[in-house]
Image (tube, grey):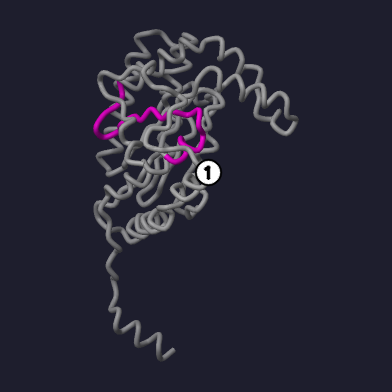
Amino acid sequence: MDEALSHRVGPDFSLADVDPTSTPGFEWDKEDWEREFHEHDDELDELQEMLFANGRSGVPGTGAVLLILQGMDTSGKGGVIRHVFRAFDPQALKIKAFGAPTAEERMHDFLWRVRPHEPAVGQIGVFDRSHYEDVLIQRVREMAPPEEIERRYDAIVDFEREMASRNVRIIKVMLHISKEFQKENLIERLENPDKHWKFEPGDLDERELWDEYQEAYEIAMKRTSTDFAPWYCIPGDRKKYARMAVKYLVLDALRSMNMTWPPADFNVELELERAKNS
């Protein structure tokens, strides 16, 4: 799954060039998928515990990981979270879903509601939608003037640079689905009573602005993809592939931290002897 890294957004990125149905680097087979999806589970578990242990022990330079998930309605953000983080220790995992801003939140700068949910040292944070909504729906729906949207791109880069300076590894993922795939998902939600709770009539209103959203996503990703907070545009029509790609990106971020277990701050031999004699 090294191909997951190849989905990184660069200066010449074009969303139209990304095939939502593609699964680069993976030949589709159920048994292969099951094996490969869980291949690194033990390593992920150890790295997450190591990150938490370093944070809890106050090891200097310990950071955190933040995964930001964006995508059109029905792109599978919730499924990615459920499958990728199923085996993670919940005490070191912080998940936040951002909906429409409240009346109080609208009284403040757009980043005000996001800052309290930054992952603490030793944590892995996950944003289901994020501050990027303020340059996506707000751009498409003209909820803010163009000059304010422009200001927000720069504010986002500064905000993420600030987090990165505290050793937060930031992974930003757009789950890119096709318009036909979204249509199938919306129809399924309407035809199955057990999925009615997932549907909102407003989803169809936003669907009418599909092209405008595609443009807004492309601009936002190109304007804010940096070395310290890169964007990855992951093909999303094949849910299993998208989940696997995101899982690998998280693994790659944890590996890049080059962690070791924190040293004991006590006399190990003395405490071992006491334990044996207790």
Q: Residue 73: where, in percent of width, then height?
A: 55, 24
Q: Quadrant of residue 222?
A: top left
Q: Is residue 90 left or right of residue 186?
A: left
Query: Which region shows up in magenta?
Result: 223-244
Q: Residue 74: where, in percent of width, then height?
A: 56, 26
Seen from the viewer's position, the closer of residues 97 and 13 is 13
Residue depicted at 41% across the width and 46% down the height = 124
Q: Residue 197: where, in percent of width, then height?
A: 69, 30
Residue depicted at 33% across the width and 14% down the height = 150
Screen quadrant of the C terminus: bottom left
Q: Quadrant of residue 46?
A: bottom left
Is 252 above or below relative to 58? Answer: above
Q: Residue 136: where, in percent of width, then height?
A: 44, 18
Screen quadrant of the N terminus: top left
User: Callout 1: few (<14), some (14-19), or many (20+) C-alpha neighbours within 10 Å?
Assistant: few
Q: How many marks?
A: 1
Magenta region includes residue 232: yes
Label 1: element kind? helix
Residue marked by disc 1: 30
Residue depicted at 38% across the width and 40% down the height = 66
Residue furthest bottom in the image: 277
Residue depicted at 41% across the width and 30% down the height = 234
Seen from the viewer's position, the closer of residues 224 and 42 is 42
- The type of residue carrying mark 1 is Lys
Is 220 above or below relative to 143? Answer: below
Residue furthest right in the image: 193
Q: Is residue 18 left or right of residue 167?
A: right
Magenta region includes residue 161: no
